[in-house]
Structure formats: C-alpha cells, structure tokens
Image (spheres, rainbow, N blue to C red):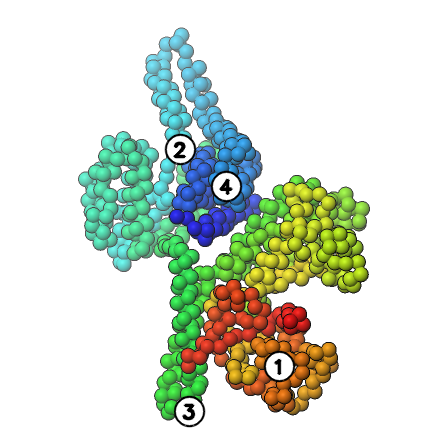
Amino acid sequence: MMNDQMMEEYIQDSLSLVDEAIDRLSSEECSPKCVNAIFRCLHTIKGASGFVGLETMSHFLHQFEGYLKPWQENNRGLNKEESQCIIEGLQLTQEALAQSRDTSLPESSKFVDFLNKIKEIANKYDTLTFSDLESILNKVKESFQTEYDDIYQKEIVNIGNQMERLLDDIHSAKKFDQLPVSHQQIEWVKIDETDITPLVRNTIEALEKVLIQGKYAFSYLNIDQLGADLNELALLLNKPGFLLSWDIIHDLCDISPEIIEEAFRRLWDECLLPVANIQLTEISTPDTTDLSRKPDETKAKQSPQKEKVETKKKEEYLRISATALQEITNNTGNLVADRNALENLIQEMGTQISARYRRYLHDNYSNLDKHVNALERQLNHLSNRQLNDVFHRLDPMVRSLSETLGKKVNLSISGGEIEIHRELIRSLNDPLVHIVRNSLDHGIESPEDRKKAGKPDTGNLTIRAERHEDHLNIRIEDDGKGLDPSIIRKKAEHKGLIKKEDHLSESDIIHLIFAPGFSTKNQVSDVSGRGVGMDVVRTAIESNGGQVHLESELGRGTVLEISLPLTEGYRTQDILLVKAGDQTYGIEYQCLKEILDSEKIDIHAYRKKSFFEYRSDLLPYVNLEDLFLDARSVPDATIDYAKGRIIVLEDEQNNMMACRVDRVYHKVKMVVVPFVHEFLKDNSLLRGTAVLGTGEPYLILDFRNVRQILNEMIEN
C-alpha cells in the first residue's frame, strides 16, 4: 500500500523533472537533444505514476508522450508554436502533480483540449514532413501519360508505383530508427591491447541495416561471418551465451523490432562500456542545402571539423527508499557518536597512559576521524537537494500570475545551487509560493500605477539565498508599494487582534500580517485574500526552528527574510559542558560570547528581574539552575551567587543574556539527537540529548532564540 511519504517523494521528484524540462525549453534552443530530454522526463513520470497507483495520470502522460514521438523519433527540434504547446502541457502536468491525490484531475476539459491541440500539431507536422515527397510523386505520374509511347515509360511508372508504396509505408511507420552509436562513429575499440574494432564495427553495421530494413537485410548479409564475429566477441569479453545470436534476431526482427535495441544494449552497454577502451568520432548531419557539391569537396570541408571524444564508462544509478537512507543516516550517527566518545575518552585519559601508546592511539584515531568525516560528508550529499528544486517552480508561476494580474514582473533568483536537506527543501515549498503570490498580488503595482508613482512599468522581485555556516538565509524583496501600517492596524483592530489603546511600533504592526486569518484584501480572488498565506509561512518556518523577519517602506517595497538552522538530524556539534546545581548540561559553543567570574559582577534587581552591567549594556541575568526549578522571587540563601561563572550568550539576532553556572568544563564534540516526543520537541530551551564516551547522557540547551526564552520566563 502506498504511504504518504512515498507519494510525497513521487510528487517532489516528478515536479523537479518537469521544472527542469520547462527551464530547458525556456532557456535553450529547442534542439532534438532537448526534445529527447522532455520525452525521457514524461516517460519517467509516467512509469512512476503507474507505480504509485495514479492510473489516470499515467494515461494522460502516455498520450502526451505518444503525440511527442514524431519529433523524438525523427530527430527533429521544435519551432516556436510547438515549443509553446509543449510548455503548456508541462505546466498542466505540474498542476496535475500538485493535486495528484485527485486522480480524476487529468480528465478535466483543459487536459482534453491540450491533447487535442498537440494531436493537431503532430498531424500538421506529419503533413509538412511528407508533402514534398507527395508533390514529387504526383509530378512523376503526370509527366508520363498513356498517349506517349516511350520505351522507358513502363519502367518509370513502376518506379512511381514503388515510390507510392514507399510513401504509404512512411505514413504508417513515420520513423527511421537509429542506434545510439553508429558504426561510422567508431574509431577504435580495444580490450587491453587487443584491437576488436573490425568485429564491433561490422556487428553494429549489420544491426543498423536490420533495424531499418527488417528481415530483408538478411538476404545480403553474411550470417555465417557475423555469427563467427559474435562468438569471438563473446569469448574476448568473457560473456558466453549472453549476446543475442543472429538466429534469434532473424526470427524476431519483424515481429518485435525492439530485439535489435536489446542486442545492441547487451553488446555495447553491458559488455563493452564496462571493460573496453573506446574512441568515437562525432559525425555531423550532412548538409543537404547544396547538392551540387562534389563528394570530395564535402569530405574536405567536414574533415577539419571532426572531433574525437573519449567514451567514459557508463555510470550506474540505484534508487533507494527514503526509509533505507534514513536507516543509514541513523547508523552513521551512531558511528559518529562512537568516534566522538573515543575522542573524549582519549582526552580524559590524558597522561594516564604512556607516551608511546598515547601517540599510537592518536594516530589511529586520526585515521578513524578522517574516514568517518568522509562518510558523513558523502551521506549529507546524498540526503541533500539543491534549492533550485524549489526555485525553478517559481519562474513559470510568476509568468502565469503576471499575465493573470496584468502586471509586468522581472524575477531574479540567486543561490539556487546551495544544497540543504531534502526534508527542509519540502518544507520551504509552500512558504515561498505564498510569499511570491502575495508579493505579486499585494506588493507590485500594475504598470499604470507604477508609472504614476514614477517607477518603471516592470516591477522587480528578487530572491537571494545565502548559506552562513549552519544557517540558511533567504531574502525575498520587491520594489512594490510596500505595506501601509495604518491599514494593517485598522484591519487588526476590526478582527480583535489588538485594541485601539495598544501602543505598537511600526515593525510590530506590519508583523501582524502573520496572524492567523489576517488579510488586507477586501475580496477573495484566485491569487490571495483568504488570509491563510502568511500564517502558513510563519508556522512552516518556525516549525523547523527558523525565524521570519519583515521590513517594509510605504511606496518603496517590502523585504522578507527567512533564517533557517541547518542542523536537522544527527550532527556533530561543539558543545560546552557546564554544571548547574547537581546536573551537567551542554550549551552550543557557537552561542558562547564570553565567560566571566561571578565575583566581578554586580547584579541589579528590578521588578523581580535580574540584570548585570556588561560593558555599556544591561543584560538579563538568570541562574541556570532556576530555569529547571520553580522561579524564585528572592535569591536562594543556600546558593553562593558570588561564586561560580557567568556565561554571556548571544543568539543569531545578536540578542544577549547571561546565565550563572557553578562550573565550566571543557569543550567536547558530541552528536546531538533532537527530541521527537511532543512534550519535549517544542520546548524552546531544550535542543536534544547527547552521550559522552563514559556513557553519561546530557541535556543540550538551546540559546539560539534568546528573546523567546526571556519572554517565556516573564510569562511563567
């Protein structure tokens, strides 16, 4: 039975393929190579659709690729009309994939209309392709009438009849097949020092002739010699019985033409590519525009352009489930934890072992550390996807929405090559779609309004992604009309989100758009106005430990910044161990600003809150032990606050606070395992757990959002 995770993987992988196909059609010349790529895209998604049980989707894609076959099989590119039609079909495929759980969707009228449209264009292409041949045939027939008694008339009429039969054959088959590699391309093929070029070249040439002419080709091919060549190849390649015999090819070539492709695949892909050294020559398509040129001149002209390319061994790919990859990740996490435990154990043992064994231990640990780090990097690479998987979907969406809204928008995207975890990629899809839709609908003005405001009629929407160590920052900026705080405040008061007497800064007011159900639109449209967009954005980002910040200037535009931690799953981190009361805790080393002696600090109390003067600022101060006990309104007489250490902590937004601890230990490397239980995973102070080499578990504290921690302390 298909689970939600497999369905989601199917949707995301298929959307990525369609995005890439649309991008190629939009940015490249529509060459035969591009057509082949689109055909493979449709074929792959069709197969996957059948696998996940979306039969209607599979049927739609089967018809789509069927109408695309004339271009693919005849090695022909697309003109502008054909290209636009294919893009329309790919966008419909995107729409169907986005709602793929509704399997009846591809049966709606617009899908049927598209199939009729591409069918008409395909038939038009067929007519154009063979119209010249029909014209020639008619002229030949008209040239020889019965009143002329010419000795060659009968023979020429027979030739005309043969041409007519050939035309019928072309109309029924509509293709001239070819193998991936022609015998004319083969420069040489060697196994070690043995040259097998003649054997391979003769075999592939014979396969090409059978592919085009069918069983008729055997009337002039030397089957005995071809069979001897094939047997010799099988012995040299150590593949007896693996290559298809010429007897089998002879019997099945007319019944199942695919037998030729299978024979080639076994010889070339399975036998030659893995073991042989192969050199091919790229052959260009003959120039048919100047038929008067002599063969020698044509050969002389083409010979300097001949380029030799070295064939690389074919790279194989395996498809594994996300569950299997996660299990490998978990096991690697355990291995990393053991590596870190061994390092901590070596540090604790210190001078207790002799210098000789200590050096031996360090050398072996260094090798282990190198290999584990390589494994961890490779696994991260396998688990990661590029941001382009999300960004590529935005360009066609912006074009479509711009036409719908009657606006001109220039979209600029950078940072798409950044790789992050595939789960984080999926969680970014909906927020970015909502942000872009809101920017086009609410932010960027119509060309007329922009001209009145003294702006170019084309608006600019910029999306820039940057990676800073363990964080991903995405900045979405437009040069539209910006947010009007007065309108937002009136809407918020009307909805009861705030009161008239509440004093809010301009920044606090514009952040009210993230409230559930909030919208400044008076009417609901197909684009926005339902009040679900920005709430979805904040919820999705914060559920992944991220933050959203919004800035806007009326008449100038809006900037929205997303900050996401890239610390999902098992991950080695530098942790500072500290003791508070009877417990030892871990604090992320990157949050550490400074460590001070308690004796040199003056604590000030104000309204049951504590502060201390740090340089020129007053920092909120708390005893770390109190965070896990009942808050004290007065200092505990049993605690000597003059002793211990003060840790100054700073989060990613440069907010600072201070914690008192009894003791500061050393920095260690640990694998932090995030909490998954509902009771603990939403706790703003707890990051997860980690285990040292001695087997002791520790709570890891999270100070990446100081403001949130302080607000919760005030509320509690």
Q: CA distance from mark 2 to mark 1?
A: 80 Å
**Residue displayed at 66% across by 50% down:** 531
**Residue displayed at 73% across by 62% down:** 508
- From the top left corner, tell me how far across and down residue 54 is, in percent: 44, 42
Q: Earlier in the sequence, mark 1 or mark 3?
A: 3
Asked if residue 483 shows in the view, the reply is: no
Q: Which mark is residue 102?
A: 4
Q: CA distance from mark 2 to mark 4?
A: 36 Å
Label 2 vs label 4, nearer the camera = 4
Q: CA distance from mark 4 to mark 1?
A: 55 Å
Q: Which mark is residue 623?
A: 1
**Which amino acid lies under the numbered mark 2 shown in the image of this protein?**
Lys
- From the top left corner, tell me how far across and down residue 663 is, in percent: 55, 86
Disc 3 marks which residue?
351
Q: CA distance from mark 3 to mark 2?
A: 79 Å
Label 2 Cα crowd, 10 Å radius (few <14 / some 14-19 / many 20+): some
